[in-house]
Image (cartoon, rainbow, N blue to C red):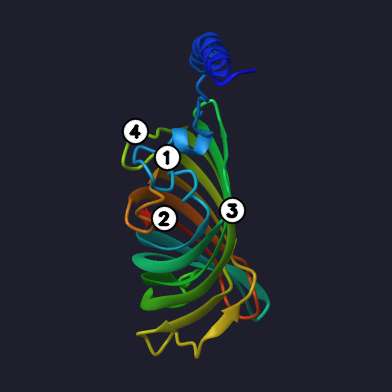
Amino acid sequence: MSTPAKRIAGAVVLAIAGPAAVITMSAAPARAELPSPATALDSGAGEPSAIDRWPGVSLGWAIHAEAISLFKHYDIGDSAAWYSGQGAGGGISASFHFRPPAALSSGVLRWIEFELGAGNSTHWVRWEEGEGARPDTDFISNQTYGIIGVHVASGRWSSTSGEPWSGAVLGLAWVPTYVHFFGNDDFESGGKLNHAGMRLSVDWGRVSPAAKGFVPGLRAFLTWLPYVGSLPTAFSAGVGCVFY
């Protein structure tokens, strides 16, 4: 084929194929990038979502007021009597919270965590020595304890608020307690360990993955120290603030 003929054939092919290529490219659908569920919960572009920041370790603390009752059975000669004491005081504790990923469904976030901590409570106690044998006496009861427990919680999740979770937390903990009585020569103790203490707590409030340990909640709890050795049985109830 001569050179002029080749040029004419090339122009025809280009005239036919060019519009077809343009039509083909314009008809190709654009690829849509759908956000992941975690990204959809995030209000800041490029930042980890609140649900992604949920797992981890945080340092929390609690402060509370507390009422206490003590009971002890004494054998005096051929007779026996129950003696008791009532008091009030307060305390403070600090704990590490170990939190695995939570379960989010239909705006409800359920989670579990493990707690490891320590605390101290001090009470003024009026001891009633029963049967009129001796007058009442006052002393100070100090309890230093460890906390090994678990929390189970359920509440509402909202990605639009600063503290996205709000709800209730149920806690159960083993609280081995070192008990020391002082302040009265008639009722002294060099300090003894009650290894069988238990605590049940109920908390209500908010939790923020971005401000762990700074958001306050309300706590109510019951503590039981059973009769161990020469120590009296102790029941206490408290209310205060807790920070997760």
Q: Residue 194: which disc?
A: none
The residue identified by callout 3 is 100
Total labels drawn: 4
The residue identified by callout 1 is 165
Q: Residue at x 37, y 47 (%)?
A: 218
State the image quarter where residue 1 is shown: top right
Q: Can residue 151 be seen here?
A: no
Mark 3, secondary structure of its residue? loop
Residue 20 at what x, y percent from top left?
54, 11
Q: Can residue 235 be seen here?
A: yes
Left or right of 60 on screen, residue 148: right
The residue identified by callout 2 is 244
Q: Quadrant of the C terminus?
A: bottom left
Mark found first going from the N terminus, 1 or 2: 1
**Callouts 4 and 1 close, C-beta under 8 Å:** no
> Given the image, on which type of amino acid does mark 3 rest?
Pro
Q: Residue 160: which disc?
A: 4
Q: Residue at x 44, y 35 (%)?
A: 41
Q: Residue at x 60, y 67 (%)?
A: 197
View extreme (right): residue = 78
Q: CA distance from mark 4 to mark 2?
A: 20 Å
Tell which tag, 2 or 3, sits nearer the viewer: 3
